[in-house]
């Protein structure tokens, strides 16, 4: 069970909604900090452990500032994310660049920042060398293909995923890099997404530890770090259980000591690129009930839409919903909770039993702190919400304003459209 609570009392939330207007994503700074500390503590046995927060999960520099203070780096995969990392001072080996199908301009920016470059394909070695340069430190992304069972529905089975090098290519790639002057190596993988089963996450570590041993045996090269990627799940549904980070850390430690240490590889650093698990549970999309509609089903239309949170619409993902101030009331009404897009998938919940909702009620959609705001789009000319930070001292700060029509029209040079 994971109990879905609000980060502040109902009265306070109502007050915040009145002050800033709805809709908004609200992020809980104190909870994010506490969670990161527990995460890093679970891996403090490793010779070197660093979490490179996946910027794509919540690309807001104010959040990155917090994570930086807690000792995290950044995992970037686009030009914009590189700039965000640079702006908050996550450069050099405090950031990594795990991209795919990468344009040279992005590699050049990554090289200029001195970040750890994680190559997605063997052809990118030559591409980098010809168009920029091969750095002294290179990481290569491994895709085990059908060797490994247990892919899940977001990433799919590894052999169906576009990411990474095959085992054979990985060995060839290391040789190519070495022959071109690279002296330091890392290996990376990411083959699960939103995984709640601790054992699958440990399996990934075991696979990578064995790969490091193999690289040493075959090529005489000791990799400097192993990057286990992201993919740690969170309990979106109340009946689901969060991954116990302490147990995860201990099990990975067991594998490290069983596989790497006896092979003389007990100094290898561990990295992770978690996004969802770090901030996901500590974000809340707060919206107001705008309309009630009773046709073949009962609908409640909100002032937020899938521009603010796409996961339910594109993955059919469950996000828990709380009707503010009605916690004690029975969930006696069956609703579809919708947004205003002309797209029938624009629903935050389908056939959800909730307390009776009145127009004007505040609804909180839980677990929007990762892949929430970030995935939003402007289809139908819908504008994305503001982002608010509930700071550790209890005060609220706007860390991104809502989009305006002028933002939407900014790329059009045409008379008569609002530009300001
Ligand atoms: C998306 C992504 C992550 C973060 O995944 P989470 O599920 O948020 O932990 C990490 N690394 C890479 C390469 C990614 O594409």
Image (spheres, helix red, strand yellow):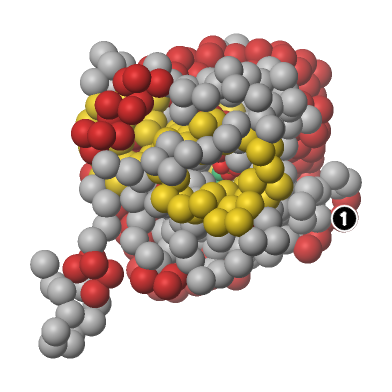
Q: Residue at x 67, y 50 (%)?
A: 350
x and y percentages locating residue 418 in the rendered image: 15, 74
Q: Is residue 134 above or below residue 274?
A: below
* 124 or 203, nearer to the observer: 203
Residue 171 lies in what quarter of the image? bottom right
| Label 1 sits on residue | 146
* 336 or 221, nearer to the observer: 336
Q: Residue furthest bottom?
A: 414
Q: Is residue 80 above or below residue 90?
A: below
Q: Residue at x 25, y 34 (%)?
A: 18
Q: Is residue 311 visible?
A: no
Which quadrant holds the N terminus?
top right
| Relative to 152, 98 lies left or right | left
Q: Residues within 10 Å of mark 1 (few under 14, many from 20)?
A: few
| Relative to 250, 126 lies left or right | left
* 221 or 3, nearer to the observer: 3
Q: Is residue 414 visible?
A: yes
x and y percentages locating residue 271 in the rendered image: 56, 32
Q: Residue at x 37, y 34 (%)?
A: 26
| Relative to 178, 129 lies left or right | left
Q: How many callouts does the rendering have?
A: 1
x and y percentages locating residue 125 in the rendered image: 54, 64
x and y percentages locating residue 290 in the rendered image: 42, 50
For disc 1, does the CB lie below 8 Å from ligand 1?
A: no
């Amino acid at each position: 069970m994971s109990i879905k609570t609000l980060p502040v009392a109902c009265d306070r939330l109502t007050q915040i909604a009145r002050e800033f207007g709805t809709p908004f994503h609200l992020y809980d700074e104190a909870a994010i900090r506490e969670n990161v500390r527990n995460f890093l503590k679970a891996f403090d046995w490793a010779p070197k452990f660093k979490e490179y927060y996946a910027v794509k999960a919540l690309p807001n520099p104010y959040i990155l500032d917090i994570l930086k203070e807690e000792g995290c780096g950044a995992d970037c995969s686009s030009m914009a994310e590189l700039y965000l990392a640079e702006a908050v001072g996550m450069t050099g080996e405090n950031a990594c660049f795990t991209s795919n199908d990468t344009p040279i301009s992005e590699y050049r920016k990554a090289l200029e920042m001195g970040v750890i470059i994680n190559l997605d394909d063997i052809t990118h070695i030559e591409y980098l060398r010809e168009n920029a340069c091969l750095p002294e430190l290179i990481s290569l992304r491994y895709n085990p293909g059908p060797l490994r069972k247990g892919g899940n529905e977001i990433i799919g089975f590894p052999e169906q995923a576009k990411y990474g090098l095959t085992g054979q290519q990985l060995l060839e790639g290391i040789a190519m890099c070495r022959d071109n002057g690279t002296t330091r190596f890392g290996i990376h993988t990411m083959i699960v997404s939103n995984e709640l089963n601790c054992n699958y996450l440990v399996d990934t570590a075991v696979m990578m530890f064995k790969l490091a041993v193999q690289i040493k045996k075959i090529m005489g090269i000791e990799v400097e770090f192993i990057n286990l990627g992201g993919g740690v799940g969170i309990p979106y549904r109340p009946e689901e259980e969060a991954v116990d980070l302490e147990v995860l850390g201990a099990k990975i430690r067991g594998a490290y000591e069983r596989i790497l240490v006896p092979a003389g590889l007990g100094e290898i650093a561990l990295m992770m690129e978690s996004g969802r698990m770090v901030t996901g549970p500590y974000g809340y999309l707060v919206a107001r009930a705008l309309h009630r509609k009773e046709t073949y089903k009962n609908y409640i239309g909100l002032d937020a839409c899938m521009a603010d949170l796409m996961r339910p619409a594109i993955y059919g993902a469950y996000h828990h919903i709380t009707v503010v101030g009605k916690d004690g009331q029975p969930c006696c009404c069956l609703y579809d909770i919708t947004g205003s897009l002309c797209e029938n998938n624009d629903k935050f919940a389908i056939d959800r039993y909730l307390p009776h909702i009145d127009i004007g009620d505040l609804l909180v959609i839980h677990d929007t702190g990762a892949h929430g705001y970030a995935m939003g789009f402007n289809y139908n000319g819908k504008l994305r919400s503001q982002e608010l930070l509930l700071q550790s001292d209890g005060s609220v700060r706007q860390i991104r304003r809502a989009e305006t029509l002028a933002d939407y029209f900014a790329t059009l040079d045409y008379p008569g459209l609002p530009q300001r």
